[in-house]
């Protein structure tokens, strides 16, 4: 039913294994028993708010922090005790950390020089890297003479120059303005895919994670909430936390009144009609409290009352945010609850519902989800 | 500099003019005027009179006489003593600067890497000695270095030496005194530079395969160049003219320009010769001062 959003070779699911990593600072648990499997060639995003432990986890991969317990196995080798300079891992820093006293060329050559590669080979590799990031013309410039986007390309080239087994990106777009960000996201992914490097990135921006990564792990308070493809996480969040972290959700608290093998019906105080989900929800008798969730873009607005028994409610248009491609309607239900609904503006001058108009919000039987509160 | 003037040019707010008026007045009173007086005396002849030099302008026979005497400068080139004193001062300043850097760099590095609270304590310890009089601290070194002083007694007592070392009244004592006295001037600018370093540069260096020592030489050291230049100039420039330390700790054979100046001025009462000596020292110091200023400008630009 759910196909991967980016087709990639994910045959080897155990290229990078993070096993039960725990990291505490004094009394604060920064990373709490995290385990992840990352396949070769994956672009894996750790998504979370600040303080969720995602950066600490990345720094442990780089070797700047040592976990209290757990293993990090890269290509069959446990690297936890290796010094950063011995790890076949390179990182692109959030601030890029380009050496200000060196030219673009010297920055890219720095890692290769540490490996005592012959001069001729270094020069060739530098040219190759400059070409990869389209920065041939800027080889002799100092970092301060470059724009933000150019610096990022140099930083990327520098971290890829040693052909690392694993590339780490720390908030890769954090230092760029919004417009440049969208362009660079796709460009960086193109470069990473052309090199075929396995990559772990850290970001707080869900759009960035979904654009760039083929797998995402949501982190909160040092734990992994959910890991999966962007589509998995968006369409099938496993918890309320995951659902609320990515995108927005309309939520109805209620309890299960029909629990069949292929469907379930939920009775909620917050919706006048019963809520229907097209899959079975196994519940214990004493655990009937659930949350019914439906994404705004899966709901529709109509002036006529739907003839279905389930999945609709009546309300007033409270507010409309016109965003060009689509509009977000805030519908106030009779009980005061606000629902969000997206409407695609496919007609230029459609007769769309307007402020204070009475409308019906409805959705199809297979749009809803049942989550545990 | 031009930009600075532009900012304060007439037509801008009045307050700005006043802001710049005070330092200008200060410089005119305490730098330009004394300098002009020294310049005037340098081109006069020594006389046994009060003041002990000939007048630049005199009124006689209904005419102004302008009396400019170059003899002092010619005399300086004729006697080797003066050239030797200049060279010795420059050499002493260079060697002292080198040792200040050698000792001061690790200190500054350590302070800059310490915890925030430790940093302020360590900086206080660097500055604390300068709260007592400079002269007293140099006298204290006499007590330490003399043949029956603290250092020799300790070394004799521990059996490291059998005979007291003759340190006082040698060049070694002068170097010890200068390095001791000028160390804070090296440590503070270096610290100010090192503490600003972004730690991610070192992490990036390690990430790219460099060990700690390599990271230091490839990244930290070149990035601290401006601090090294600033500290070195702050030590080198005053040490060239240093008088007190060679006088108190040095022997009769440590001829430095500061001491020669003193002798010409007070012992020989030859004010014009002393003035021309001072003038040439100033010209010599223009080179490092210019170098220092250029570097400071670069650092400013870098910070913007």
Image: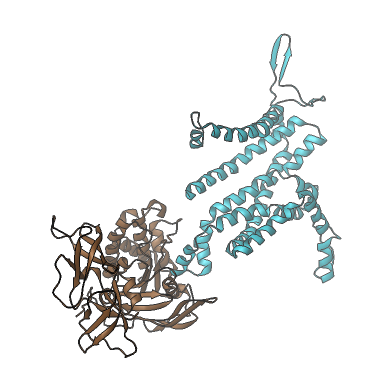
Chain colours: A brown, B cyan
Name the residue nearer the viewer: A112 or B165: A112
Q: Position of residue A105 (x, y in %)?
A: 38, 58
Residue A198 visible from this viewpoint: no
Position of B8 with respect to A7 (left or right) is right
The quarter of the picture where the C terminus of chain A appears is bottom left
Q: Dividing the picture into quarters, in which one does residue B47 lie? A: top right
Q: Is residue B129 above or below residue A43?
A: above
Q: Is residue A215 above or below residue A143?
A: below
Give the farthest residue toward the top: B62
Q: Position of residue A181 (x, y in %)?
A: 31, 59
Give the farthest residue toward the front: A334
Q: Is residue B118 above or below residue B81?
A: below
Identify the residue at image location x=40%, y=73%: A89
The quarter of the picture where the N terminus of chain A appears is bottom left
Q: Position of residue B165 (x, y in %)?
A: 81, 61
Give the farthest residue toward the right: B148
Position of B290 with respect to A80 (left or right) is right
Identify the residue at image location x=47%, y=69%: B206
Identify the residue at image location x=45%, y=66%: B204
Name the residue nearer the viewer: A364 or B267: A364
Name the residue nearer the viewer: A112 or B304: B304
Q: Is residue A355 above or below residue A285?
A: above
Q: Position of residue B181 (x, y in %)?
A: 72, 52
Residue A98 visible from this viewpoint: yes
Position of B38 with respect to A95 (left or right) is right
Name the residue nearer the viewer: A104 or A207: A207
């Amino acid at each position: 039913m759910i196909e991967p959003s980016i087709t990639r070779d994910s045959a080897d699911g155990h290229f990078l294994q993070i096993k039960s990593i725990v990291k505490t600072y004094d009394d604060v648990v920064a990373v709490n028993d995290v385990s992840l499997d990352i396949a070769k060639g994956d672009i894996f995003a750790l998504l979370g708010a600040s303080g969720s432990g995602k950066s600490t986890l990345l720094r442990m991969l780089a070797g700047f922090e040592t976990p209290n317990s757990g293993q990090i196995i890269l290509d069959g080798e446990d690297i936890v005790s290796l010094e950063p300079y011995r790890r076949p891992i390179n990182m692109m820093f959030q601030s890029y950390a380009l050496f200000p006293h060196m030219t673009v060329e010297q920055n890219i050559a720095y890692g290769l020089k540490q490996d005592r590669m012959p001069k001729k080979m270094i020069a060739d590799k530098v040219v190759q890297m400059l070409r990869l990031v389209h920065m041939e013309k800027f080889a002799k410039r100092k970092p301060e003479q470059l724009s933000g986007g150019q610096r990022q390309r140099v930083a990327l080239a520098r971290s890829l120059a040693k052909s690392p087994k694993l590339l780490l990106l720390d908030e890769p777009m954090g230092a760029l303005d919004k417009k440049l960000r969208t362009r660079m996201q796709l460009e960086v992914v193109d470069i990473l895919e052309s090199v075929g490097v396995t990559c772990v990135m850290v970001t707080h921006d869900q759009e960035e994670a979904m654009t760039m990564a083929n797998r995402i792990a949501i982190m909160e308070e040092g734990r992994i909430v959910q890991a999966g493809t962007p589509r998995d996480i968006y369409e099938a969040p496993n918890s309320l936390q995951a659902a609320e972290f990515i995108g927005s959700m309309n939520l109805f608290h209620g309890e299960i009144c029909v629990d069949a093998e292929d469907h379930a019906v939920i009775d909620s105080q917050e919706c006048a009609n019963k809520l229907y989900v097209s899959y079975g929800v196994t519940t214990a008798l004493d655990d009937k409290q659930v949350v019914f969730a439906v994404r705004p873009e899966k709901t529709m607005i109509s002036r006529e009352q739907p003839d279905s028994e389930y999945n609709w409610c009546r309300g007033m248009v409270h507010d409309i945010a016109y965003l060009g491609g689509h509009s977000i309607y805030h519908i106030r239900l009779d009980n005061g609850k606000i629902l969000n609904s997206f409407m695609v503006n496919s007609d230029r001058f459609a007769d769309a519902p307007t402020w204070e108009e009475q409308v019906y919000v409805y959705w199809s039987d297979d749009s809803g989800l049942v989550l545990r509160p | 500099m031009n930009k600075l003037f532009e900012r304060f040019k007439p037509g801008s707010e009045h307050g700005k003019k006043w802001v710049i008026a005070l330092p200008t007045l200060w410089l005119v009173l305490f730098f330009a005027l004394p300098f002009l007086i020294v310049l005037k005396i340098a081109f006069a002849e020594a006389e046994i009179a009060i003041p002990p030099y000939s007048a630049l302008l005199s009124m006689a026979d209904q005419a102004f006489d302008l009396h400019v005497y170059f003899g002092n400068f010619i005399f300086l080139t004729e006697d080797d003593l003066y050239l030797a004193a200049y060279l010795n001062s420059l050499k002493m300043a260079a060697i002292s600067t080198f040792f200040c850097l050698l000792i001061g760099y690790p200190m500054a590095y350590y302070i800059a890497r310490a915890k925030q609270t430790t940093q302020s304590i360590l900086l206080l310890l660097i500055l604390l000695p300068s709260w007592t009089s400079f002269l007293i601290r140099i006298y204290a070194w006499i007590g330490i270095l003399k043949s029956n002083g603290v250092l020799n007694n300790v070394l004799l007592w521990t059996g490291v030496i059998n005979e007291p070392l003759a340190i006082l009244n040698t060049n070694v004592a002068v170097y010890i005194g200068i390095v001791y006295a000028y160390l804070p001037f090296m440590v503070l600018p270096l610290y100010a530079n090192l503490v600003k370093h972004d730690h991610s540069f070192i992490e990036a260096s390690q990430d790219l395969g460099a060990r700690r020592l390599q990271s230091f030489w490839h990244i930290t050291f070149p990035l601290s160049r401006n601090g090294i230049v600033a500290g070195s100039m702050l030590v080198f420039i005053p040490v060239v003219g240093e008088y007190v330390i060679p006088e108190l700790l040095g022997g009769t054979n440590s001829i430095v320009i500061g001491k020669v100046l003193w002798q010409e001025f007070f012992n020989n009462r030859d004010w014009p010769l002393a003035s021309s000596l001072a003038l040439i020292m100033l010209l010599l110091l223009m080179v490092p001062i210019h170098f220092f200023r250029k570097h400071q400008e670069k650092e400013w630009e870098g910070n913007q």
